[in-house]
Image (cartoon, rainbow, N blue to C red):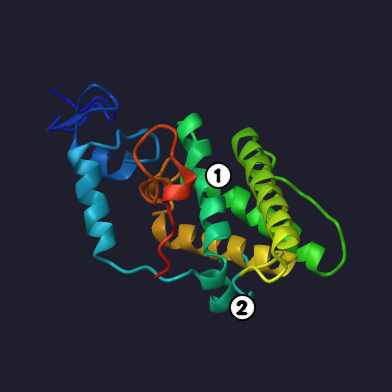
Amino acid sequence: MTCAICEKRKAVRFCPAKGEKICAVCCGTEREVSIDCAADCTYLIAAHRYEDEHKRELPADTPLLDVKVSQDVIYGRQNELSGLAFAAAKFSAIHPATTDADVLAAFQALAETYRTLGSGIIYEKPPDAPLPRELYGALAASVEESKKELAERAGSAPYAAGGPIKNSEIFSLLVFLYRMGVLRTNGRPRARRYIGFLRGQFPAAPELKREESRIIVP
């Protein structure tokens, strides 16, 4: 039997996404590229395990690499960080076609928006593609919800921990989540490694209860 993809080499691996056997070469080169791999595929799991064993560094051309992220903000704003991660995880659960690239595009675009807000300029440029653009809106809504909750809490208890969140802090959280995504994804077009990580920070239940979860800062 020949490979269902190249139709040249011998088919030796069953591909759950294709529902038929393919060759080892096509499995390796087309995985998460032209093949929308099933998360429970044994070959995908093995490939991800191999990737985990080899530490990645942020590429020199990574956007927002010049930004210094304050660890005080990351640790001090865990609830807001968790809220943003929850928004991305929930969106991906509702829209299964979402990929790591979509999530990264949304985080990057919203971070750029908050960078301009920090300089007193209001300039928004959401992603052009439909899914990351919609996720951008969901993340922005999450930020506004956090701002409202913090403002109400400060109004009832002026000395409450945390206090109102600054735009510069939101910017830092978005940059942190973006960089984390760059490090956790493998860069393949249909990869969902980062999404899997974000969803793993929350209960497996469909509702993804926000209050029971926190992002673990490395």
**Residue that numbered label 1 is attached to:** 87
Amino acid at the residue labelled 1: Ala
Closer to the N terminus: mark 2 or mark 1? 2
Q: Quadrant of the C terminus?
A: bottom left
**Rendering quarter of residue 30:** top left
Mark 2 and mark 1: Cα distance apart in space: 24 Å
Q: From the image, state whether disc 2 or disc 1 is nearer to you.
A: 1
Q: Is residue 70 left or right of residue 180?
A: right
State the residue lying farthest toward the front: 156
Instruction: Identify which amino acid the numbered label 2 is placed on.
Output: Lys
Q: Give the structural element (helix, strand or loop) at label 1.
A: helix
Which residue appears at 61% of the width and 70% of the height? 161
Crowd tier of the residue under label 1, counting other residues whose Cα lies within 10 Å: few below 14, some 14–19, many 20 or above: many
User: In the displayed structure, would residue 35 be above or below residue 113?
Assistant: above
Residue under the image location 64 percent in, 74 percent down:
67
Report which residue position mark 2 lands on: 68
Front residue (pair 215, 116): 215
**Percent from the top left, x then y, of residue 163?**
68, 67
- Does residue 158 appear left or right of residue 207 in this picture? right
- The image shows residue 109 at horizontal and vertical percentages of 67, 53
98, 58: nearer the viewer: 98
Q: Position of residue 120 (x, y in %)?
A: 87, 66
Q: Nearer the viewer, residue 216 or 45?
A: 216
Q: Residue at x 53, y 37 (%)?
A: 91
